[in-house]
Amino acid sequence: MITGAQAMVESLKQEGVSTVFGYPGAAICPFYDALRGSGIQHILVRSEQNAGHAASGYARITGRPAVCIATSGPGATNLFTAVATACMDSIPLVVITGQVETRLLGRDVFQEVDTTGAAEPFTKYGYLVKEVREIPRVFKEAFHIASTGRKGPVLIDMPVDVQQQSLPFAYPASVDIRGYKPRFKGHPVQVKRVAQAICAAKKPLLCVGGGVHAADAAERVCRFCEQCGMPAVSTLMGIGVFPSAHPLYFGMLGQSGFRSANRAVEESDLLVIIGARVGDRAVNSPSALEQATEVVHIDIDSAEIGKNLGATIPLVGDAGAVIEQLCEQKPSGVWEQWLSHLRELREQEPRPYTEKPGAADPRRLVEALLEKMEPDAVYVADVGQNQLWSARYYRARGGRFLTSGGMGTMGYALPAAVGAKLAAPNRQVVAVCGDGSFQMSMMELGTAVQHGVDVKLVVVRNNRLGLVREIQQNRYGGREIAVDLSGSPSACGIAAAYGIPAWQVSDNGSLGQAVERLLRTDGPALIECLVDPKEATE
């Protein structure tokens, strides 16, 4: 016989979990007591939200569900933003929260929250465990649900008394959940229809999203395009599916994407979307596109097909499996004139650079990073202007580009980079954030130092909430309010307080040297890059 808390730890070990991210509290203390000496590494974050972001970074690099932990009440609610962020980007997490005793549920006692109810809109599934004997089954199902179909976060809410009760432990060998049978392969008839549509098209275009990364299908998608000669673009979350220099890749589409990519979408007569929800930031006028273009939408989640853009041919299935099926059909066409036109559009893409005294160009900063970083490095972009500069000027060469796409959560980059580095200790990991987002998660420098996580951080400082300021300039007559961050502490000073080497750079000529110094420094290090407060993303 073992306790429920010990059963939780044993269940994690059965699932091959070696690292978890969390912040303890009274209602989850039995679990933490059982975790001690288990061999599972616990990473103590400085805020529960960042446990979820760190787990997200870990999961995105390993491709397996990652675990984050919080206590009841405010511990759980602090975690919710990270859980919603993971849900929007289809990141597999198992989220463990403590809960008050079962006899006190629903009485509004100290630190009680209806965690499963509150989190229901942004979790794939949620369990409130009231019987200790259910722990092994619940954990087995949670990992299965998180990692199959459209991946996402699964919540396990554990009352403290259930953690203290005893059970004979036996971990299930398999899972059979009635009503949960995600489709993996695409329907053969629909696959054939898609292949025929590709062959008939004069201007076909493939649009890849984050679902391709989630399915670990990037190489297969590239091979498909090479096999049939079909051009491609990506959403923000699909960056990195194709190497940036690939002759068939024409950049990121959307409001902040490349004009050439958006023109390609507008002019195509067949748009094949795979693993993307094509929200408003990707396609600004879906009704016009529906009328002008035949749309194929391939997604593991049938609910996403047609949600934002009507599909002429819907196809439900895993991105990797469907692409393999399409390869077997060997679709092809005569598209050289179309490809030549797209190459001309790409060559006409403007490259604005600025030279301003006392300020570096953020575009040159991103390019300097990519020049010095190793090809398989992980680049983690936060949200705001830094995200858009990063996305537009990132050059994929075999590494990964991580960011918060669907939710656009500021403060994501640093904790996600910590998780990514722990998942891949032999790869360079660089986080890029603005001075606004840095102040939302700068406490995680302490996590990096405590656990010896060799993550590099670049803070793009303009003393503004830059993207909001830009929106106010463009849409509200230049009337600025609540975007001035003057008085913020020096990022270098904050880093120094944690014993982290840091330095400022404020001109284009010093960027290369500063980045090289950052990357060769042992342990965590930071650059504070000063940019013009009026610098825009276009």
Image (cartoon, helix red, strand yellow):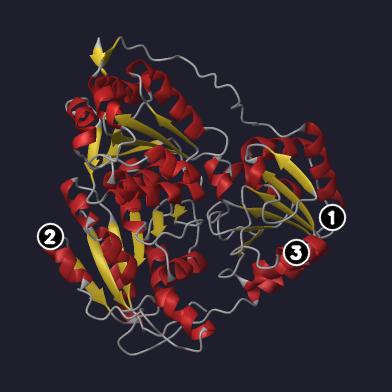
Instruction: Between label 2 and label 3, give the one nearer the viewer.
Output: 3
Q: Is residue 420 visible?
A: no
Q: Is residue 199 visible?
A: yes
Count of numbered circles on the image:
3
In this picture, is 221 found above or below 506?
above
Element type where label 3 sits in the image: helix
In this picture, is 49 found above or below 469?
above
Mark carried by residue 287: 3
In this picture, is 60 found above or below 434?
above
- Residue type, mark 1 in image: Ala
Q: Which residue is mark 2?
A: 499
Element type where label 1 sits in the image: loop
Other-residue count near label 2 (Cα within 10 Å), few / some / many at <14 / 14–19 / ≥20: some
Tell me the CA gap for discs 2 and 1.
59 Å
Give x and y (percent) for residue 179: 61, 25
* Sequence-first disc among 3 and 1: 1
Left of 273 or right of it: where is 475? Answer: left
* Sequence-first disc among 2 and 1: 1
Element type where label 2 sits in the image: loop
Q: Which residue is mark 1?
A: 201
